[in-house]
Image (cartoon, grey):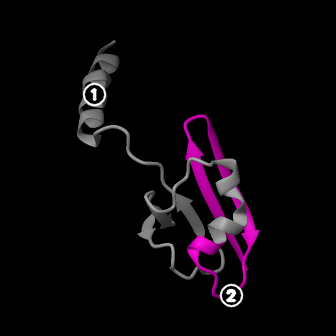
């Protein structure tokens, strides 16, 4: 069955479509995709994983057509980013 494995960094996005056998886990699909060779900084033990934007675990069995997403760690406080966007957004709107 076909599934997708996706990962993105600011300068690059990768979406790999692969075939996995029935009963394959998220971990098996990620490993088979080869994405860990392209992005050696990925740490499956610490980074969050999702399927279609819903958090999941590495031992979840994937279904046909699943989009497995590997999320980068948050490097900024979301509240600070939101506040900065509001501050910058109001200036841009007035000009």
Q: Position of residue 62 (x, y in %)?
A: 59, 79
For this view, does 88 lie left or right of residue 39? left
Identify which residue is drawn at 51% across, 79% down: 59
Q: Is residue 94 above or below residue 89?
A: above
List the residue tagged with mark 2: 22
Relative image position of residue 16 (x, y in whole percent): 71, 59
Residue 2: in magenta span: yes
**Image point 71% across, 63% down: which residue?**
33
Instruction: Magenta stretch: give its range.
Output: 1-28
Picture quarter containing residue 27? bottom right
Residue 8, percent across and down? 58, 46
In x, y percent, where is residue 38?
69, 49
Q: Secondary structure at mark 1?
A: helix
Q: Is residue 36 left or right of residue 69?
A: right
- Numbered circle sitting on residue 94: none
Name the image quarter holding residue 4.
Answer: bottom right
- Towards the viewer: 11 or 86: 11
What is the quadrant of the N terminus in the image?
A: bottom right
The reply, left or right, for residue 83 in relation to residue 3 is: left
Q: Residue at x 51, y 80 (%)?
A: 60
Q: Residues within 10 Å of mark 1 (few under 14, many from 20)?
A: few
Q: Which mark is residue 84?
A: 1
Seen as rendered, the residue at the extreme bottom is 23
Dot 2, crowdedness within 10 Å: few (<14), some or many (≥20)? few
Residue 20 occupies quadrant: bottom right
């Amino acid at each position: 069955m076909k599934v997708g494995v996706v990962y993105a960094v600011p300068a690059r996005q990768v979406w790999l479509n692969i075939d996995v056998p029935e009963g394959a886990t998220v971990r098996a699909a990620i490993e088979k995709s080869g994405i860990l060779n392209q992005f050696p900084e990925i740490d499956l033990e610490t980074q969050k994983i999702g399927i279609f934007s819903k958090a999941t675990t590495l031992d979840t069995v994937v279904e046909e057509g699943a989009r497995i997403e590997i999320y980068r760690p948050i490097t900024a406080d979301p509240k600070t980013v939101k506040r900065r966007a509001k501050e910058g957004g109001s200036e841009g709107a007035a000009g």
